[in-house]
Amino acid sequence: MGFTCFKCLKVIDGDLKLLFFHLKHSHLIHERSHTNIPCAQNDCNSVFLRLSNYKRHLFNSHKNLFPAEENQHLISDRIHRADSGLESDNVPSDNDAMGEGEEESEHSHESDETISDLRDMTAVFVAKLKAYPALPNAVVDEVINDVSEIMSHTISYIERKLDSISKQMPPQYLEDFPGISDFQKELSSDLHDLSNPFVDLLNEYKRNDYFLKKGVLIVPEDKLLGHTLASKVDKSTGNAIQIQQEDTFQYIPLHQTLKKYLEQPGIMTAIQHFPGPKDDGSMCSFKDGSYYKEVWNDIIKQPLIPLLIYTDDFETANPLGSRKGLHKQFSVYCSVLSLPPEYQAQLEHINLVALGNSKFVSKYGLDKFFECIVTDLNKIYSDGIYLDCDDYKGLVYPKLFQLIGDNLAMNPLMGFSGSFSANYFCRFCKMLKTVSHAALEEDISLLRNKENIEEDVIMSKPSVTGVWRSSILNQLTYYHVAENHTVDIMHDLFEGVAPKEIKLVLGALISLKCFSLEELNRRILCFSYGFKDKDNRPSIITEGSIQNPSGSSGQKVAQMMCLVQFLPLIIGDKVAVGCDYWEVLLTLFEIIKVATAPVISQEGAIYLQTLIKEHHRLYLQKFEEQRLIPKQHFMLHYYRIIQALGPLNQYSCMRFEGKHKPFKNYARLCNNYQNISKTLAQKHQTNQSYKYLLQQPLNVHHFDLFDQSVLTLSSLEAAETISQKLGIPMDADITVASRVAVFGSEFRLGSMLMRSPDNAEEDPVFSEVMSVVVHMNEVYFVGCDWETMFFERHYQAFAVRRRSPPQIHLCRPDHLLETRPLHAAQSHDAEGNTFFIACRHRCL
């Protein structure tokens, strides 16, 4: 028998001490760790916040896992305590404090710790310090030096104390116990080794050398772009002299990065369990698109690892200051598309590939940056990458699936015109700009393909073709830019179309005296957004913004998403049903909800195509002075792109742009812009080395509980329903929580859930969360179903009300239609107990 580690699921043979030693040194979990601790023994569903509670639970509930001699000892000890009157019927529960047992969990493993173990702990400590984005290297050096000095003085004091005790021992004592002398020598040697635990980590060079030998650090490489002349002050004379300076960018070798990343615990398991194409015609991933099935997939080289390459610029200095643009960075990131969506959204799963000054892109061109990337991509696909880890042993074949980014970054890299004012601005078709201003449908005859792009390259007339050059990406043996179909719904919809049309429609409604700008802003500030969206509450809309629809909206992307979701509820009661201006906005919101949905059917894609055509017609009809902008033109291609690639939300740049934030924060913190690209790349790689050093697997349970406790099932309000659904007796213990984080969102008591109805023809079912329970390491929402009355298109929301008597339902998170909590709110003209729930997506 043995104990199962809940982190890595490894079976730890031996006594309980070895399990806690493993948790402490392999996963850095100790008594003060703030983490959920599921039992993981024999399908036990108990979850704890403290190791002391976990240990007591193992003693009380899993005695069969202890070695026979230790188990017998525990029984004998319990009998002895009972005979001595030390144990009563009031036995402490799993949630009681451990007392002496808690102290034991902290100190009982010291005899087992070796010098090597302590050196590894020291390395983890240093790596963790360096991974903190708020700590510059100079501060890390100071902390290490100070801790090292404290350790040295402490060990020196202990050595002197032991030497003093040794001298006071009677000679006869040493003769009676001859092993004492050997023990003293061994202890003295160990203390000497411990006097400077940072001996291999005292400076940056030694630290990098240590982590390189451990195989967890991938050092950024300087890639030479060219040379430039610069001025430098001669310190000896004070005169300015001219020197030749190398222009470089930082490249993190793609082969090494992918190998190390894919060998992390749980990664390959998650990739191999990624669902295949759907059989019912619906599309929920890239595997449901025609591009994967007909073009990209290779039946010979398996398994294939689909890669997304993202490129963008970001500002490291003050964007309004005098150094604006001087230290702007050009970045290239990479992620694996076949990971579950909840992991793709985490920044640690987005790997840095290249980083350099943006001015070098203008000076040397994009091809100089991508030469090494294209070479590596060709090599890893042709030769594969050999993985040797617990999850997988053998070759894998990473292969570029799509390039993603905003239009400003994508078009030049792919060889097309980078300006929206160009005659042929679209990378998907060759529609003339003046024609696109009123186009309602995609013209299939104008679509770009490999043949006409090559012809346009030879013609070399960008003003006539929209093609400037042949992209270096075409040198990939399996890829051509004509096959890159991605659009970015974040930039197209939430930073382009939606802000402009919202301002146009609101301006028209204000001029019609439907409401005033002051009333609109008052409602925006006072509306109940729910706990999930309260931090994304939209900013007030200024009069200048209304008068300049093409200007900045003053909203962040998250705020604009919130405004799109709730604006009809906020002000819809002031607008007459059937108002043509309001209809433009409602149609746009419907388009956004379908286009951003994680799942879409063939019928839904056709419906989206129809909505876009109708929206553009209404828009041009009601705003005669306006014409369709390029981002509205890109919407015409959405139907075909969905057919090729599946749902568009997989290719959103939102999380990739979130990767910029740590770089920006650290650049401003260190305030040293001398080769800032190298500084940022090294900081990122150090952060990654810390994660690789820990070897922490993907979260097996996919959830984090808060404020949980273990209760008897019969004490719960919905005990009978839970007992029937889960098949457990009423007197069983069950873990109950008030909050749970799953799919990257936090669900609380009172949150609204949306799930599919039993009859596909009916409206979705909404439930209010009463509690969260855990059984067999699975989370279940205990919800009180509400009655769904109808969908109110004017408010873009479902009308709901509480049922009487209440109906209780158990629902797993993976059965939800919306993977984020919803909120029930009342419109200003609502009567009685009618509430409205506005959803962010519409799955058709």
Image (tube, rainbow, N blue to C red):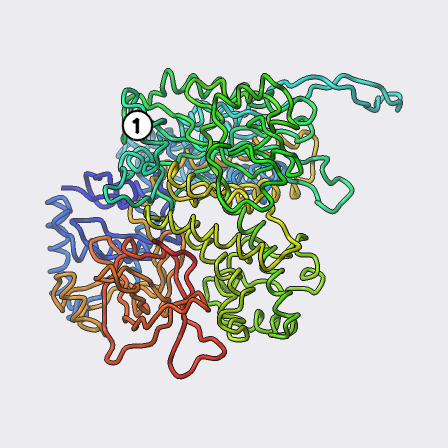
Task: Please give the name of the residue rendered at 21% of the width and 63% of the height, measured from the top-left corner.
Answer: 734
What residue would you read off at disc 1? 389
User: Would you call the spot at circle 1 few (<14 residues within 10 Å), some (14-19), or many (20 or more)?
Assistant: some
Q: Is residue 448 visible?
A: yes
The quarter holding residue 738 reads bottom left
* Foreground residue among 152 and 54: 54
Q: Is residue 391 left or right of residue 511?
A: left
The quarter holding residue 326 reads top right
* Foreground residue among 269 and 214: 269
The secondary element bearing badge 1 is classed as loop
* Foreground residue among 716 and 122: 716
- Name the kind of residue labelled 1 in the image: Cys
Q: Position of residue 764 (x, y in %)?
A: 30, 63
From what the image shows, is residue 389 above or below residue 809?
A: above
The quarter holding residue 346 reads top left
Image quadrant holding the N terminus, namely top left
